[in-house]
Image: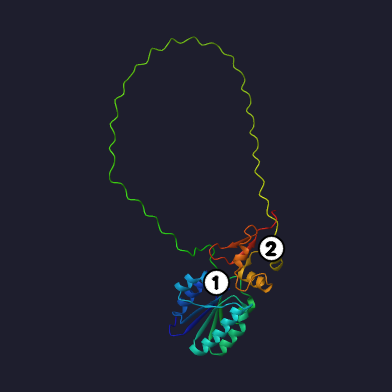
């Protein structure tokens, strides 16, 4: 570990999950000992969703008011060139699974920087990994809770004063009258017990009928055919396609669109969703 090296970390926060960002910062600090520049490039919605993480890791969010596809990537690239010229870092670490940064990596290396890459496992193409001096894939830890646990409830103080038990009142004892002499038992005819009737089978109620599919939902599935095939799709990829087909506004988050149809789509994980699945598949 060489703490004298100047290290710059640039994060494509619209492309990787918050858990991968946190792991990337820990990894670079462990290996390099210091991070002189920490910036995350994202939309306003992503900045609000990750503001606690950015504060905890001292990451400066660079908010981009999106004007089209890849506008956040272009902002990261132009900012990286300006920072390298002004700050003269020894190492530049780009956290993204996007393969569009290959020209930027080559240009930064020409400026005398070592360029390392960190991507999310399963999202990075093999062709883009060889452009970096080194490239590491980090697995997203599913089901990790991002919110702190609720505070423990305080127990009520125990009562010190106790009520004295009231003395029982005397009860008069009354002797019962003598029992009459028992009569001789008569022989009774026994009847064969009727066989018990089998309980009627319980028929479960029919499942509620699914509402008819809206017209705009058909348009969504036409743009995202992987969902109709039963595949889980990355939320960032779905957002780019929906915006390119003008089914989603430039500033509107895709989560709001999918949550309009809770009977048809499922987002995961619950706290900071980055995956979407289609629930309207026919049951086997």
Does dot 1 land on a helix, a strand or a loop? helix
What percent of the width, then of the height, locates residue 271?
Answer: 53, 63
Q: Earlier in the sequence, mark 1 or mark 2?
A: 1
User: In this orientation, which residue lies closer to the viewer: 187 or 214?
Assistant: 214
Looking at the rendering, in which quadrant would you find the N terminus? Answer: bottom left
What percent of the width, then of the height, locates residue 149?
Answer: 44, 60
Based on the displayed image, in which of its 4 quarters is residue 13 positioned? bottom right
Regarding residue 74, the answer to whether it shows in the image is yes
What percent of the width, then of the height, locates residue 35?
Answer: 46, 80
Image: 231 above or below 159: below
Regarding residue 132, the answer to whether it shows in the image is no
The reply to whether dot 1 and dot 2 touch (C-beta < 8 Å) is no
> Residue at horizontal 63%, vertical 80%?
100
Image: 235 above or below 61: above
The numbered dot on residue 229 is: none
Pointer 1: what residue?
46
Pointer 2: what residue?
217
Based on the displayed image, in which of its 4 quarters is residue 105 positioned? bottom right
Does dot 2 land on a helix, a strand or a loop? helix
What percent of the width, then of the height, locates residue 199?
Answer: 63, 33
Image: 82 above or below 119: below
Label 2 neighbourhood size at 10 Å, few (<14), some (14-19), many (20+)? Answer: few
In 3D space, how far apart are the residues under numbered discs 1 and 2 (Cα atoms)? 24 Å
Q: In the rendered picture of this protein, how many numbered marks are placed on residues? A: 2
User: In this orientation, which residue lies closer to the viewer: 165 or 24?
Assistant: 165
User: In this orientation, which residue lies closer to the viewer: 246 or 231?
Assistant: 246
Label 1 neighbourhood size at 10 Å, few (<14), some (14-19), many (20+)? Answer: some
Based on the displayed image, in which of its 4 quarters is residue 251 positioned? bottom right
Coloring scheme of the render?
rainbow
């Amino acid at each position: 570990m060489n703490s004298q090296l100047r290290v710059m970390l640039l994060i494509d926060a619209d492309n990787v999950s918050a858990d991968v960002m946190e792991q990337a910062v820990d990894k670079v600090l462990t290996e390099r000992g210091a991070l002189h520049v920490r910036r995350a490039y994202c939309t306003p919605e992503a900045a609000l969703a990750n503001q606690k993480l950015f504060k905890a890791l001292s990451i400066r969010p660079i908010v981009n008011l999106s004007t089209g596809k890849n506008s956040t990537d272009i902002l990261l690239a132009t900012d990286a060139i300006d920072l390298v010229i002004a700050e003269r870092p020894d190492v530049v670490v780009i956290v993204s699974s996007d393969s569009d940064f290959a020209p930027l990596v080559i240009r930064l290396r020409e400026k005398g920087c070592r360029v390392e890459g960190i991507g999310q496992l399963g999202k990075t193409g093999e062709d883009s990994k060889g452009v970096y001096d080194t490239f590491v894939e980090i697995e997203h830890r599913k089901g990790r809770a991002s919110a702190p646990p609720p505070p423990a409830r305080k127990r009520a103080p125990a009562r010190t004063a106790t009520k004295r038990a009231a003395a029982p009142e005397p009860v008069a004892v009354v002797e019962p009258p003598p029992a009459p002499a028992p009569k001789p038992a008569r022989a009774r005819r026994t009847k064969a017990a009727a066989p018990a009737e089998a309980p009627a089978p319980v028929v479960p109620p029919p499942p509620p009928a699914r509402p008819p599919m809206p017209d705009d939902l058909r348009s969504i599935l036409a743009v995202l055919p992987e969902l109709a095939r039963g595949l889980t799709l990355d939320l960032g990829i779905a957002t780019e396609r929906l915006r390119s087909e003008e089914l989603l506004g430039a500033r509107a988050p895709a989560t709001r669109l999918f949550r309009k149809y809770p009977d048809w789509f499922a987002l995961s994980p619950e706290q900071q969703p980055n995956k979407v699945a289609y629930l309207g598949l026919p049951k086997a």
